[in-house]
Amino acid sequence: MKKVFLIISIVAGFAFATQAQKKVSDLTIVYDAVVNTGSAQPKMADAFDGATTTVYIKNMQSRTEMASSLANFTTIHDSKTGTAVVLREVGGQKILIRLTAADWQDRNRLYEGISFSNTGETKTLAGYNCQKAVAKLQDGSSFTVWYTPEIIPENSDYSSQFANLKGLPLEYELMQGKMVIRYVVSQVSLNPVPIAKFDIPKSGYREMTYEESKQGRKN
């Protein structure tokens, strides 16, 4: 009799876990950015503090928008081909950069081999149960992330940073120089994302190669 109850408990627990986890093909998530400089970097802080980051996912396509009072950055990525387009709007200048699959891999090399370890801490964000994890990168750096295992994007390649995470990140911290930028979820929507979100502009932008954009970051 005990064995029967044990089997029923295992099956029930598995069914609950399966039901709790939801794989989604369409997803929109909005994050608010909060900056803690810890040093005199007012201009850099202004570029991020109060900014919003919106991620749209539809099947194998994703679009990430970072909007602030000083600049807008948009990345449109196709996980099927591995290619991407980056749009930059800074000081009235609008630049479009096309990335091959190799370029995309090079751009995200920092996150190759990233691993996540749960801490056992939990809390609720946007109505979802979240777990705290520490991400470790191959360069020895780390950051914390709160994620919910209740939502699993079918397109796990929408973000190289969270490709190995077993859920959806709802809060995380990143270092930008001496600044700590904390991204906190403000909205999650599972409504269908319009396919037009992933259209590439055909005019209005000056095109730049990926190699040229890398030189620009060095100067």
Image: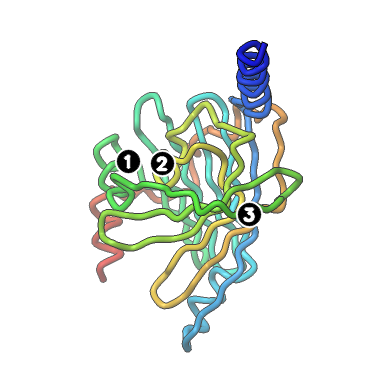
Q: Amino acid at mark 3?
A: Tyr
The quarter of the displayed image where residue 32 is located? bottom right
CA distance separating discs 1 and 3: 25 Å
The numbered mark at residue 52 is none
Which quadrant: the N terminus? top right
Question: Picture coordinates of residue 106 (x, y %)?
Answer: 25, 46
Q: Residues within 10 Å of mark 2 (few under 14, many from 20)?
A: many
Residue at point 71% right, 37% down? 189
CA distance separating discs 2 and 1: 6 Å
Give the vertical position of 16 relative to 35 (above or below). Answer: above
Pick whichever, 208 or 45, lies toward us.
Answer: 45
Marks 2 and 1 close (CB-CB < 8 Å): yes
The quarter of the displayed image where residue 35 is located? bottom right
Residue bearing mark 3: 31
Residue bearing mark 2: 85
Q: Which residue is most to the front?
A: 1
Q: Amino acid at mark 2?
A: Val
Give the vertical position of 6 relative to 219 (above or below). Answer: above
Mark 2 or 3, closer to the camera:
3
Q: Amino acid at mark 1?
A: Leu
Upstream in sequence: badge 2 or badge 3: 3
Upstream in sequence: badge 2 or badge 1: 2
Question: Picture coordinates of residue 89 (x, y %)?
Answer: 50, 58
